[in-house]
Image (spheres, helix red, strand yellow):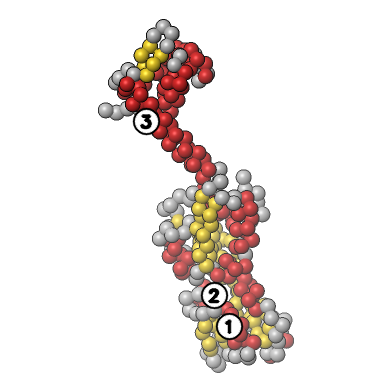
Amino acid sequence: MLINLSTKQLRAFILLSECRNFTQAARRSHLSQPAFSALIQRLEEDIGARLFERSTRHVHLTPEGQLFLQGARHLLDEFEWRFHDLNDYVTRKKGRVSIAALPSIAAEWLPQVIARYRAQYPGIAIEIHDVLSDRCLTLLQSGQVDLALAAPLQIPEGLYKTPLLADRFFMVCRQDHPLARHTQVTLAEVHAHDVIRLARETSVQQHLSAQPLSDSPAKASFEVENLATVAAMIRNGLGITLLPELTLSQFNHPSLCTIPLSTPLTREIFLLRDTSRPLSIAAQTLWEMIEHPRKEIT
């Protein structure tokens, strides 16, 4: 049997069971008595049983009405709880957002946006994965994160991108290095010295590898995974490096200096999402805040 109950009918039934009077119950529900009586009649027709015994002065629950009362209260409580719970998500009082970001983004630029987001929506939980660019894409495509901040050379099909910023490369060297006296350097000049490179799977090295550094190979090269290692090797005179601007906070040391390239080289940072999955309201709000960090989100 298909029963089409409404919350309006359930509230009317519970109210009448408490008032035991159609006139009072109709008044409390802000309905006319005929309209209120029609609600109860339709409910009894849908259930297929009389729920109330009527007399000229009083209304009493039938045994079937007594059985239905507990269920009606439970159904209405459950509906109202679900509705208010969903409303908390809609109004951004509750929720969860997961984002994957390049370590340089997660350490330097993203925390400012997250702090502003948390100040406006303290009830929303935020999960951050600071991983390399390829891993950002993997987490996004597998549905493990809602958004990604990455710098891929090629963006897979099915991902929506919006350019976020162009992260310019600089040379980093020791203050006593011959190139430290230059106001600008070329890629060829950098390549003529010992170069410390980041691992090939990093977006930094992927972008550098796509550039013709020089016709001749470097004198010597080191390949490491961590920026802290790069900084320590430069401080100890083991070479120089090329790094984007967002990473340079790791090289704030009196013995080191940064020199811009004569021909600007950048890695493009993109804000990404998977078009096959709609964003939650919480995730959409964070997307808009990252895309327009100075815009007020309402």
Name the foreground residue: 77 vs 2: 77
Mark 1: amino acid = Val
Classify 10 Å Cα crowding around label 2: few (below 14), some (14-19), many (20 and above).
many
The amino acid at mark 3 is Gly
Front-lying residue, 104 or 245:
104
Horizontally, is 55 left or right of 27 in the view? left
User: Closer to the N terminus: mark 1 or mark 3?
Assistant: 3
Above/below status of 207 relative to 82: below
Element class at badge 3 = helix
Q: Nearer the viewer, residue 130 or 169?
A: 130
- Image coordinates for residue 169, horizontal then vertical, percent: 62, 75
Query: Mark 3 to mark 2: distance in Å?
Result: 62 Å
Question: Mark 3 or mark 2, which is nearer to you?
Answer: 3
Which residue is tagged 3? Answer: 71
Q: Residue at the location (35% across, 22% down)?
A: 65
Q: Are marks 1 and 2 in contact (CB under 8 Å)?
A: no
Horizontal and vertical percent position of residue 54: 38, 11
Q: Which residue is drawn at 61% across and 62% down?
A: 111
Q: Please tell me which residue is depicted at 50% across the width and 65% down the height of the picture.
A: 129
Q: Mark 2 — residue? A: 204
Sooner in the amino-acid sequence: mark 3 or mark 2: 3
Q: Residue 10 placed where, x, y %?
A: 42, 26
Where disc 1 sits, the SS reads helix
Above or below for 49 versus 225 = above
